[in-house]
Image: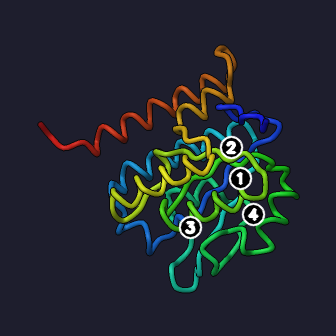
């Protein structure tokens, strides 16, 4: 019987993969402000713990670089350019995962039903445990995002949220790093509140 993946990632095996959060794609996303606030929180939390982060960019000559609000926190993270929808189709991606020691990746990015999904499926197919931060993935249309997340879940990905990942990685309160993460949670919540319609 195949062992079930742990519902929470462990620091010594995981890292963040930021998929195609690019300047010419972001403006067309459904709930883009919510997505950007959440993905910024996730990136900053992972960096706080000094865990590896790997960035992909789909045809950056046409779709532009990584969005500035995210790129600000990724200045020293390796980037892999690709033209395949699955990042696994680019040999440099697999090489980077190995070099960074990312055995059980946490996926975030766009689009949930295309590049994120195909990357998740290929990673699962290679025998890896894959965590999908469902509130840190986006598509142009809500139904596409929902379908992408559900397809990944059915294929075996551990579908979770940015906060679940963050608190799972910390495990306990009290450290200075945890206090810094709590501040990031508050900043995220304030940003999300600004995206809500006035009642």
The 10 Å Cα crowd at callout 1, few under 14, some 14 to 19, many 20 or more, is many
Residue at the spot of label 2: 47
Q: Nearer the viewer, mark 1 or mark 2?
A: 1
Q: Which mark is residue 184?
A: none
Please state which of residues 118 and 174 is positioned toward the viewer in this rendering: 118
Disc 1 target residue: 53
The residues bearing labels 4 and 2 have C-alpha atoms spaced at a distance of 13 Å
- CB atoms of marks 4 and 2 within 8 Å: no
Asked which quadrant contains residue 182, the reply is top right
Sequence-wise, which precedes: disc 1 or disc 2?
2
- SS for dot 1: strand
Query: Pointers 1 and 2 in contact (CB under 8 A)?
Result: yes
The disc placed on residue 78 is: 4
In the image, 2 versus 127, the foreground residue is: 2
* Residue placed furthest toward the right: 99
User: Which SS class for mark 4?
Assistant: loop
- Residue 115: which numbered mark, if any? 3
């Amino acid at each position: 019987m195949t062992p079930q993946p742990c519902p929470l990632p462990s620091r010594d095996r995981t890292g963040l993969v930021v998929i195609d959060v690019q300047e010419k794609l972001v403006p067309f996303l459904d709930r883009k402000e919510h997505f950007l606030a959440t993905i910024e929180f996730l990136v900053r939390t992972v960096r706080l713990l000094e865990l590896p982060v790997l960035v992909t960019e789909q045809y950056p000559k046409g779709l532009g670089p990584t969005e500035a609000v995210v790129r600000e926190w990724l200045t020293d993270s390796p980037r892999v350019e690709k033209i395949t929808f699955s990042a696994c189709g680019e040999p440099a991606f697999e090489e980077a995962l190995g070099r960074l020691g990312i055995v059980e990746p946490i996926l975030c990015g766009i689009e949930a039903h295309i590049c994120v999904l195909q990357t998740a499926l290929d990673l699962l197919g290679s025998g890896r445990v894959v965590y999908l931060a469902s509130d840190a993935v986006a598509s142009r249309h809500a139904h596409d995002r929902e379908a992408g997340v559900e397809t990944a879940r059915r294929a075996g990905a551990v579908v979770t949220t940015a906060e679940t990942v963050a608190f799972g990685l910390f495990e306990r309160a009290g450290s200075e790093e945890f206090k810094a993460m709590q501040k990031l949670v508050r900043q995220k919540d304030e940003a999300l509140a600004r995206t809500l319609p006035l009642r």
